Amino acid sequence: MACPKDNSTLNVSIPVVMVAKSTGVEILLYSPDRPIVDQGVLFLWLMSVGTIICASLWQDMTTTEQTDERYNELSPKESSHGGAVKDDSEKEVLDISVKGAIFFVISASLFLVLLYFFMSSWVFWLLIVLFCIGGIEGMHSCIMAIIARTCKCCVRNTVHLPLFGETAIVSIIVLCLCLAFAIFWVIHQAASYAWIGQDILGICMMITVLQVARLPNIKVASVLLSCAFLYDIFWVFISPFFFKDSVMVAVAKGENSGGGSIPMLLRVPRISDPFGGYDMIGFGDILFPGLLVCLLFRFDRSNKRGVLNGYYFWGVVGYACGLLFTYLGLYLMDGHGQPALLYLVPCTLGLSLVLALIRGELRLLLSYGNDSTPDPSGQA
């Protein structure tokens, strides 16, 4: 291979060596060592555990002892003539039923198959739009809850909007800032720092979802997590026998979306890995166990349990250990995608049931939430 002497017209970026067959040169390929544990995994582990803790304690952290108005969403305010305002016990929540849990897992499976077969650039952008809508709503709700908790006077100035009625001015400003944040992330989602915006939007959305949806009792939790347990195992380990590869892994990596990672997960870049890439965890691996941890928190509040003699603390510990087992399995299987719920469900639901059995409180735990009496904690 010849290069011009002035080297002005040829810019060689890939080294090329021509060796005659008679030379007998031995060529060895060098592969840099990869770290056993990358710092990105630890950061992702902290984000996942922190999201569940924050979501379960969010109600206590953001609700004052005497709440006069609700400023956490763009909605018409209650009439002030009668002076009656809805309290926390009347907040709209979605109680998941057994049928709803089964239907949700079946719907998630169908949605996953559709993404696997029909993923394209326009479907990818549709997911981006839906993610941004959920992220904006979650981010707005979280910021407004913090503002209403720390500075009540900031939310007293209102303006009348045609569709929303009397709305706090600061709520409109926060909404515009959240919208600008999401648009900035969409424009720069190919940048090296785009994972930060995706994680912020995703965490805010999951915190909001865990405030709206809840498991009414441990029986529904068992059905939901058991179905999710089988769902994760099938679409990661068993689906390659029916499809050409693992459906869950293919969709998570965005192999049919032009290389873009779909915004249904948290991701952190590998810091010490010379090959680069991202460590990821799906939203479902946080939301499903998070619903159970929130249920355990309400149970401890209702029964006035302490930290060690309750179930919430051990639920968080179980989730943290299950996530560590997930990354251990990922390492032992040489980076092959792992169904995180395979480890998380036994470490959360299994640990809670075994602990209740050892304490002789299994019947008490199973009976919680089965009657029609309101939650003594007043928490959704």
Image (cartoon, helix red, strand yellow):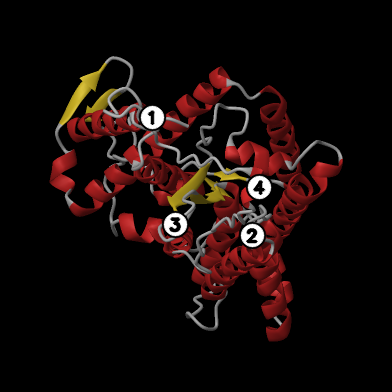
- The type of residue carrying mark 3 is Thr
For residue 22, which numbered disc appears in the image? 4
Badge 1 crowding class, 10 Å Cα cut-off, few under 14, some 14 to 19, many 20 or more, is few
Q: CA distance from mark 4 to mark 1?
A: 24 Å
Q: Are marks 4 and 1 in contact (CB under 8 Å)?
A: no
N-terminal-most mark, 4 or 1: 1
Q: CA distance from mark 4 to mark 3?
A: 63 Å
Q: Are marks 3 and 2 in contact (CB under 8 Å)?
A: no
N-terminal-most mark, 4 or 3: 4
- SS at mark 1 in the image: loop
User: Who is closer to the viewer here, 110 or 23?
Assistant: 23
N-terminal-most mark, 1 or 3: 1
- SS at mark 3 in the image: helix
Q: CA distance from mark 1 to mark 3?
A: 57 Å
Residue at figure coordinates x 72%, y 39% from the top left: 247
Badge 4 crowding class, 10 Å Cα cut-off, few under 14, some 14 to 19, many 20 or more, is few
Residue at numbered disc 3: 51
Residue at figure coordinates x 27%, y 50% from the top left: 146
N-terminal-most mark, 3 or 2: 3
Q: Quadrant of residue 73?
A: top left
N-terminal-most mark, 1 or 2: 1
Badge 2 crowding class, 10 Å Cα cut-off, few under 14, some 14 to 19, many 20 or more, is some
Residue at numbered disc 2: 369
Q: Residue furthest front?
A: 22
Residue at numbered disc 1: 3
